[in-house]
Image: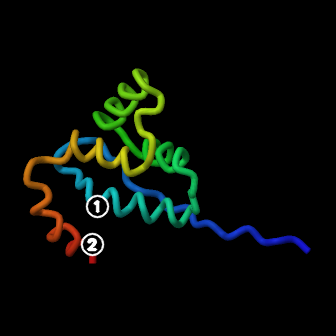
Amino acid sequence: MHSRRPETLKIDISKSRGVEKDSLLRWFVELDDAIRARRIDDGEMQVAFAQSNLAGRAKTWALGLKLHDPYVFESLKVFKSRLRKTFEPPGAEFRAPTELLKLK
């Protein structure tokens, strides 16, 4: 008897470019949904998947950090935190509830 592999769902997400008009909060929601749907449980793979969905300034930033330290993003939590500190505009935490309401 063969055990069935859990089915995965390939969800595409938008690219985060590191520009102010991009909403990191929305991108994090998309990212988390896609990681769950694809059943990516390994931390390194989660970070690799997240990085594969960067573009422009954000991708250049991440690759630059990895050139100096291949293990700079030790977890998805660290990756998100560093991305937020680098690209989230000041006061974004006050806009977050409004952005979440737009998702509904």
Q: Is 17 drawn above or below residue 6 in the view shown?
A: above
Tag 2's secondary structure? helix
Check the image and report above or below for 41 versus 80.
Answer: below
* Circles 1, 2 touching at the beta carbon (< 8 Å): yes
**Which corner quadrant holds the N terminus?**
bottom right
**If the image is split into quadrants, where does the C terminus sit?**
bottom left
Can you tell which quarter of the image residue 69 is in? top left
Residues packed near mark 2 inside 10 Å, few (<14), some (14 to 19) or many (20 plus):
few
Q: Considering the numbered disc 1 on the image, is that residue within a helix, a strand or a loop?
A: helix
Instruction: Name the residue type under label 2.
Output: Leu
- The dot on residue 26 is 1
Describe residue 67's horizontal placement relative to residue 19 as left or right. right
Which of the two residues, 83 or 34, is positioned nearer the viewer here? 83
Q: Is residue 41 left or right of residue 23?
A: right
Dot 1 amino acid type: Arg
Extreme residue toward the right, this view: 1
